Image (cartoon, rainbow, N blue to C red):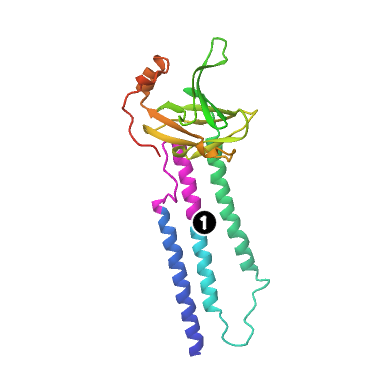
Amino acid sequence: MIRSNRRTSRRRLVARVAAGAFLLASATACELPSFGYPKGITPEAKRIYNIWSGSSIAALVVGVGVWGLIFWCSFAYRKKTDELPKQVRYNLPIEILYTVVPFVIVGGLFYYTARDESKLDRTPKPDMTVSVVGFRWDWEFGYIEKGANGQDVVKAQVVGRPGQPAVLVLPTDRSILFKETSADVVHSFWVIEFNFKRDVIPGRVNEFEISKITRTGTFIGRCAELCGVDHDRMDFIVKVVPAKVFDAYVAHNYDPKYLTASTTGSAS
């Protein structure tokens, strides 16, 4: 009888420790750690940041719970005698538990991913449109306006060269539509602070839109698709300036000298 009570006490202790570890891991969700992701400079980037952090926290909580159960079972059900322990095969409550719990977890992740993905893929009428052309081994950007016949007209182009990455100037607080295509192989347009990348595919136009950029500064963009021998050199620069500065830049035929030193921040 005494031995049985001791076993029960030990099991309760291990269960409490496992529950405490589980709650401790859950509590860290309040601070939303980045797990290596930048918070971003657009509302869409923050949405992606939240789903990344949330899914990482969910994985961590599940992992801690599983580790706790493994350690608890290893301790509570370790071999003590040659007597065969009680078998739990065909235990209906346990089978329902380990079927329903993963279904709920996967369903939750699917819901939030589908919800955010549908919002990220929306392209309402933008304030401006930028064309993006990837080629081996650089980038070409164009500022698109509507012509008299309603067709897209590229008003200015910026082309990168070896040792001189293309500089894409964008304004704050305006929605921007990016239209992407490739001149040769598959590339991928990635601005790190956007927390977003989209493939640039030959013979196809891919699109995505950001509702606004919230911070001025100079940021690094890269090709995120392994596209060949000089893939690592396909960097470009995104210079974000206040809307008034960008308007002056456009009014003077995209002359770089009209970009003032009002931007803040550093290349990432």
Query: Where is residue 173, by image quadrant?
Result: top left
Residue found at x 45% / y 71%: 16
Depth check: give the residue in front, 196 or 221.
221
Judging by the rendered image, the residue that carries numbered circle 1 is: 59
In percent of width and height, residue 121 lies at 55, 34
Depth check: give the residue in front, 41 or 236.
236
Q: Is residue 112 above or below residue 102?
A: above
In percent of width and height, residue 49 lies at 46, 44
Given the current orientation, which residue lies at the most extreme right position?
A: 90
Residue found at x 40% / y 18%: 255
Q: Is residue 92 left or right of residue 56?
A: right
Depth check: give the residue in front, 45 or 130.
130
Q: Is residue 129 above or below residue 232?
A: above
- The C terminus - image quarter: top left
In percent of width and height, residue 221 lies at 47, 35
Given the current orientation, which residue lies at the most extreme bottom position?
A: 1
What residue span does the magenta drawing correspond to?
30-57
Query: Where is residue 149, by image quadrant?
Result: top right
In percent of width and height, residue 127 lies at 46, 22
Q: Is residue 205 above or below residue 35?
A: above
Q: Secondary structure at mark 1?
A: helix
